[in-house]
Image (tube, coloured by chain):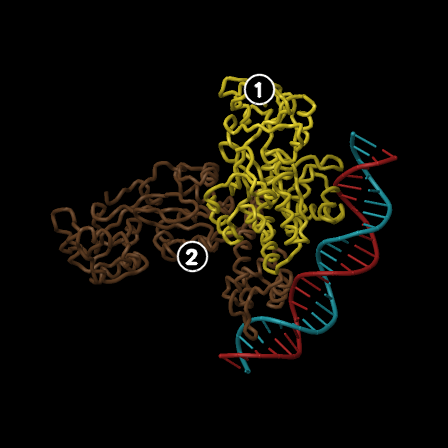
Chain colours: A brown, B yellow, C cyan, D red
DNA sequence: CGCGTTTACGTCGTTCGTAACGATA
DNA sequence: TATCGTTACGAACGACGTAAACGCG
């Protein structure tokens, strides 16, 4: 049993039991992987895969139990390597972030740009997806960190750091009837119009749905999209009125749309930074996190992660546009 | 970085930074270990040991951090091997038990004999020591399980299974004045005589000391020893009166000693079986534990360990001599 | 016949143990 | 001088990639 054999094993599993694609991932030949797996099977005394003819069809029950130990084992090996790279001030590395389009488009750019200036050789990878998908990526170890939003209960993860609060805003065409209400917007007003919002708002448990439910109303979700640009476009074209994150407001620009505050209608959201307890972070990752948490430096971040506490930034700020930090909209 | 290198590294650390003795432990030559460590250091980019001339003097700070990951890493590797051996019904293996002399001499023999009949090829190793020492052995991974006793708070360990309760008894020479009291023994009676008991009773926090303290008395500990045989011998020779575990009574035998109950004077003790959460147990170890817990089978033991609950045997029995299960003394 | 796994084979790199060396107490 | 870590060297083992063989769909 070697670290290489276990890594091959896990890679094959994560490649859908396809040795060929696994071989490409680890930069080796199929032949090597096939042989190493056979050797591992010989040593363990049982088969890891059920094979039909010449293809792998499934994991054996024993293999799944091996997997439960092999994954944390390799995680520790990765931690030792990360430790080594941190100590030797290695400037190369990778950073995989799982997050939503909203964060990737409106929150992360300036932070990642700063990170890239500090660590030019670090390859950064953004994996867009829904909140649940991002959590799953983190859990599978495909991402080093996940950034997701929620209102109410915080998402489930080893380490949760609240980054900021934010509100949703309503987007209506200029000269829309709702711009001339002469009073604060009410949920009932919204219920009379088709809505264009994020995909997540389709879920029964979304905070938008729940807010309407609580008021005894039913929203008409006319269309959903992943990003505010698309939503704004469809609002312009008269498909309905938009509900987007305030972070996206400056990107939807133009005089033909009007932004109406809605924090009195929909619950405040919190954006969380999520980490795995079992992963040792590279210095560049810690620096990125310190940038995201105002008033935190690398040391306090490491301390907070060790303690697994949320107390890096005891008071969670509201969202501010890092490019226009003195402008405070929609309040 | 290989599993072998990490194992060599850990073995050297656990051998007091002596490569030569570490080499013997892993059945290899000093040369190999020295080379492998150097290679590991090259790959990590920093030294693991500080060297003075030609000897290892200390771990570097970085090495201690590597150690924190290397130990659980190798634990997982060991678990995979244990899994393999369980599945292939491997009958060979080792079993390291850290416990006190009392348990090893009076409680374990019949159980280990039964285990040996079921698994003749398993090599069993008893590491005698005080309760604290046994806990340390378990924590360092030198023992697969520890068996220790305490009254009051249970000992600190990942998994705690209470095995049985037991009382202490007082050992006096036949025709001793205390045998003719005509009333139950009191602590004050004991305080008038020099006591011969276990080494642990010397500690301020021992339950014997605390019982005397609570009564406003001070015991005269005349002599301590590790086992009841020795204690009985010294009692016979008039050095004092003995305080021993009831499990040892049948071994101190002879008409020249009288056993006086003392459960109304000293608190009841509980014997605990302690396990590490991160170690996967071999089948023979589970079988041994199942034997120790009356009414538990291997499956229920595994389930209890998974759940880390003490609920294998909801009601903890009092000690019974497995060779004379129907005799109930001192009650 | 393409796809994917397994097997065969020659080459290369690595690890092993023996043994000599250097340095210390 | 005994002990302990490092270095040198030859032998053996093992892993790698190329390439051919094999079974399905």
Q: Nearer the viewer, mark 2 or mark 1?
A: 1
Answer whether residue A117 is visible to the viewer in this image: no
Q: Which residue is mark 1?
A: B219
The residue at 62%/25% (across/down) is B172
- The kind of secondary structure element at disc 1 is loop
Q: Viewed as shown, does residue A247 lie left or right of A185?
A: right
Q: Say above or below: A50 vs A110.
A: below
Tell me the tag on residue A127.
Answer: 2
Q: Callout 2 environment at 10 Å: few (<14), some (14 to 19), or many (20+)?
A: some
Query: Label 1: chain?
Result: B
> Residue B74's spot in the image, x, y percent?
60, 49
Q: Viewed as shown, does residue B91 lie left or right of A288?
A: right
> Residue B150's spot in the image, x, y percent?
54, 33
Asked whether disc 2 touches disc 1, contact meaning CB atoms under 8 Å apart, the reply is: no
The image quadrant of residue A230 is bottom left
Give a yes or no on whether discs 2 and 1 share a subunit: no
- The kind of secondary structure element at disc 2 is strand
Q: Say above or below: B190 vs B129.
A: above
The image quadrant of residue B325 is top right
Camera-nearest residue between A187 and A34:
A34
């Amino acid at each position: 049993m070697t670290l290489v054999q276990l890594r091959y094993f896990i890679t094959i599993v994560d490649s859908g039991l396809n040795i060929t694609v696994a071989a490409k991932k680890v930069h080796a030949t199929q032949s090597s992987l096939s042989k190493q797996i056979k050797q591992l099977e010989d040593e363990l005394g049982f088969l890891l895969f059920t094979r039909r003819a010449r293809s792998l069809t499934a994991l054996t029950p024993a293999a799944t139990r091996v997997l439960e130990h092999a994954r944390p084992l390799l995680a520790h090996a990765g931690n030792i390597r990360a430790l080594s790279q941190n100590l030797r001030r290695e400037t190369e590395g990778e950073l995989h972030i799982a997050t939503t389009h909203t964060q990737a488009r409106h929150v992360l750019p300036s932070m990642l740009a700063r990170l890239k200036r500090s660590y030019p050789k670090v390859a950064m990878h953004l994996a867009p997806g829904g909140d649940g998908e991002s959590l799953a990526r983190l859990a599978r170890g495909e991402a080093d960190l996940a950034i997701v939003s929620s209102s109410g209960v915080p998402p489930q993860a080893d380490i949760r750091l609240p980054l900021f609060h934010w509100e949703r805003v309503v987007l209506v065409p200029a000269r829309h009837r709702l711009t001339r209400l002469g009073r604060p917007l009410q949920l009932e007003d919204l219920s009379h119009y088709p809505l264009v919002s994020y995909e997540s708002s389709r879920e029964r448990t979304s905070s938008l749905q729940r807010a309407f439910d609580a008021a005894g109303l039913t929203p008409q979700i006319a269309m959903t999209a992943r990003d505010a640009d698309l939503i704004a476009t469809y609002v312009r074209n008269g498909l309905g009125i938009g509900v987007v994150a305030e972070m996206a407001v400056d990107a939807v620009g133009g005089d033909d749309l009007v932004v109406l505050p809605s924090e009195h209608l929909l619950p405040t959201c919190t954006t969380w930074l999520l980490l795995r307890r079992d992963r040792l972070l590279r210095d560049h990752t810690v620096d990125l996190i310190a940038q995201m948490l105002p008033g935190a430096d690398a040391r306090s971040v490491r301390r907070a992660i060790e303690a697994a506490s949320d107390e890096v930034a005891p008071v969670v700020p509201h969202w501010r546009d890092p490019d226009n930090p003195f402008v405070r909209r929609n309040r």
